[in-house]
Image (cartoon, grey):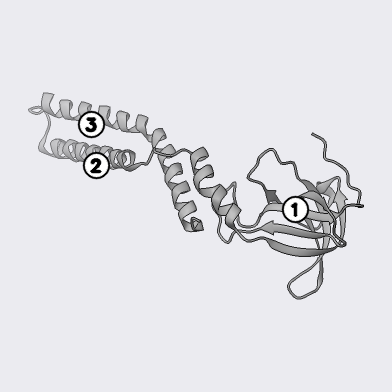
Amino acid sequence: MHSIDKVIIVYESISQAYSTVVIIPAVLLWIIVGVYSLMDMIKNNNAISSTGFIMRWLFFVMTLSIVGFLSINIITADFSMNEKQWKNNYLDPYINALPENKTYVQEFTQILEIHKNGNKKIESIYLNKKVKPIWVELDVLDKNNASETIAVQTIIQKEPIDEPYLTYKAINKNISKEYPKNSYYETILHIPEEYKVLVPAS
């Protein structure tokens, strides 16, 4: 399994590669400016004062530095992998290999209007984008065995059990804006088979 640091590093390299595409027009523009500046110095060499020549030479050197810096960023960018490949080869295996956290649920209520719920809200992220979770209000025990009410995005799975419980995975670092550490991953609310819940609209 890849470490979370490796997952982040590869993602950042992909993001950097995409950002270099934006600076290619800037490189071309600075090359044009540099060529024009050089030709102007050569053409008007006799008419330019020593001070003016030095200023134009410094501007030309600055232009070369900018072009060189931007060119290095383009050359060193890694275009060998796109975001879909990163997800398949790094993110998915990492999330799938994470241990499940298990929390016993005292009570739960399906939330139909999440914006009206004032409890702590925890969004859930699923590797399968076709999964459609619902919001559920849960009464759970925190680390100090104190009762806590939270709103969690989850899917519901009926099983031959006596008491409901929640399973989820968690990461300890932000991977990206789309995959933050304050979300749950692959969240499932396991409930007894006789419980009734509403099916989310497709």
Position of 139 with respect to 51 (left or right) is right
Q: Secondary structure at mark 1?
A: strand
**Nearer mark to the viewer, of 1 and 3:** 1
Which label sits on residue 188? Answer: 1
> How many residues crowd around disc 3 within 10 Å: few (fewer than 14), some, or many (20 or more)?
many
Is residue 103 placed above or below 156 in the rendered structure?
Answer: below
| Residue 152 at x, y percent in the picture | 76, 54
Mark 3 and mark 2: span between their CA atoms? 10 Å
> For this rendering, which residue is in front, 52 or 1?
1
Position of 121 with respect to 108 (left or right) is left
The C terminus appears in which quarter of the rendering?
A: top right
Say which label, 3 or 2, has the lower sequence index. 3
| Residue 15 at x, y percent in the picture | 46, 43
> How many residues crowd around disc 2 within 10 Å: few (fewer than 14), some, or many (20 or more)?
few
Mark 2 and mark 1: span between their CA atoms? 54 Å
Q: Name the amino acid type tagged 2.
A: Ser
Is residue 129 placed above or below 152 in the rendered structure?
Answer: above
Which residue is rendered at x = 55% and y = 59% of the image?
Answer: 173
| Residue 33 placement: quadrant | top left
> For this rendering, which residue is in front, 96 or 124?
96
User: What residue sits right under mark 3 in the picture?
Assistant: 34
| Residue 19 at x, y percent in the picture | 43, 39
Which label sits on residue 65? Answer: 2
Position of 196 with respect to 75 (left or right) is right
> For this rendering, which residue is in front, 164 or 154?
164
Q: Name the amino acid type tagged 3.
A: Gly
Q: Name the amino acid type tagged 1.
A: Ile
Which residue is rendered at x = 49% and y = 40% of the image?
Answer: 85
Q: Secondary structure at mark 2?
A: helix
